[in-house]
Amino acid sequence: MNIVVLFGGTSPERDVSLRSGENVAATLRARGHQVETLDTADQNFVAKLLQLKPDCVFPALHGADGEDGKVQGLLGMLRIPYVGSDVRASVITMDKYLTKLVAIQNEIPTPSFIHIYDRNDIPDYVSVVNQLGSPFIVKPCDVGSTIGLSLVSSVSEYESSLEEAFRFSDRLLVEEFVDGFEITVGVFRLRDQFFVLPPIWVVKPDKVFDYDTKYKPGGAKHIYDLPISDYASEKLTFYSKRICKIVGVGGVARLDYIVKDETPYLLEINSIPGMTAESLVPDEVRQAGQDFGQFLEDLIRDAL
């Protein structure tokens, strides 16, 4: 099969995307496919894509221009089959604020939050603590890989966290910090059915699962013996399938939760999860007893 893997791009998550794309491409080549990688930061990438005439495109893009529906809309306009979520699902899942609204509307727990969309109307530190408690999280609305995220417990940290988050987005979430077990769940869609991969308990050295912990070898432990009850595990599966179906997620996605007092709190949905050698979804696929290459092939065939 002639496959083009889109990677790179111009978002702050470019480096992770390059690694994800290379891993996907190498895995598919090992299974005998003709695979080309194409960097969407190249201003001629559309012309090159059309010249390659792929049977299917596998987006391995992270962040803006990759997960936000733009590339999906372009591929749809060009009538090129692609793996993953459509424009609607991409737009919703890329925006952490919209994802929270969908979760709340469908009675899926999510940490309390304040949406900042005007730099001239930012709540002061005391107001935030009164509403959300301390510490709390500050993060961009539409950036992944924990980029621009800060854990805040003082006025000075609040000021610097706002400055850092505004480097990556004009809209922020100030979010309640739920101190519990960080659990991530992979969900994939085949023939309009949703399947849940084995959840991972992410054991990290610090309270925040930051960029280095996610992507550097040895940064975090992936543990499948979950420290939660069967009831909480069933809730994870139920909530994950439910919101993926409502939003219309395609391909494979990763949902991040904090579980506290047997309640899973949804943090976000990653419509194009990391596919590096250290990433969570490939690990979950192997834990499920599946070959990662076969898994990728199944997603591609389902997109055709």
Image: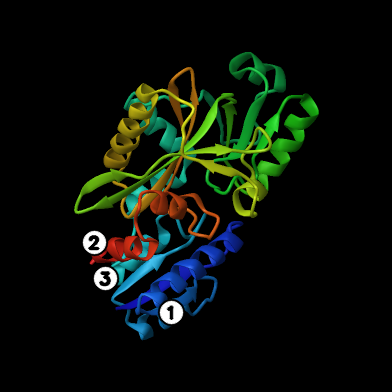
- Residue occupied by mark 1: 36
**Disc 3 on helix, strand or loop?**
loop
In the rendering, at what x and y percent does residue 101 appear?
40, 31
Q: Check disc 3: other Cα within 10 Å, few if <14, some if 14-19, many if 20+.
A: few
Q: Quadrant of the C terminus?
A: bottom left
Using the numbered discs, state the Cα–Cα distance from disc 2 to disc 1 in whole angstroms: 20 Å
Q: Check residue 302 in the rendering and tell me which mark sits there, or answer none.
A: 2
**Disc 2 on helix, strand or loop?**
helix
Q: Residue furthest bottom?
A: 51
Q: Check disc 2: other Cα within 10 Å, few if <14, some if 14-19, many if 20+.
A: some
Q: Check residue 79 in the rendering and tell me which mark sits there, or answer none.
A: 3
Q: Amino acid at mark 3?
A: Arg
Q: Which residue does the image show at 57% across and 64% down from the upper left?
A: 10
Position of 20 relative to 171 (above/below): below
Q: Which residue does the image show at 60% across and 48% down from the upper left?
A: 214
**Disc 1 on helix, strand or loop?**
strand
In the rendering, at what x and y percent does residue 233 appear?
38, 29
Q: In this rendering, does residue 121 appear at all?
A: no
Using the numbered discs, state the Cα–Cα distance from disc 3 to disc 2 in whole angstroms: 16 Å
Q: Check residue 223 in the rendering and tell me which mark sits there, or answer none.
A: none
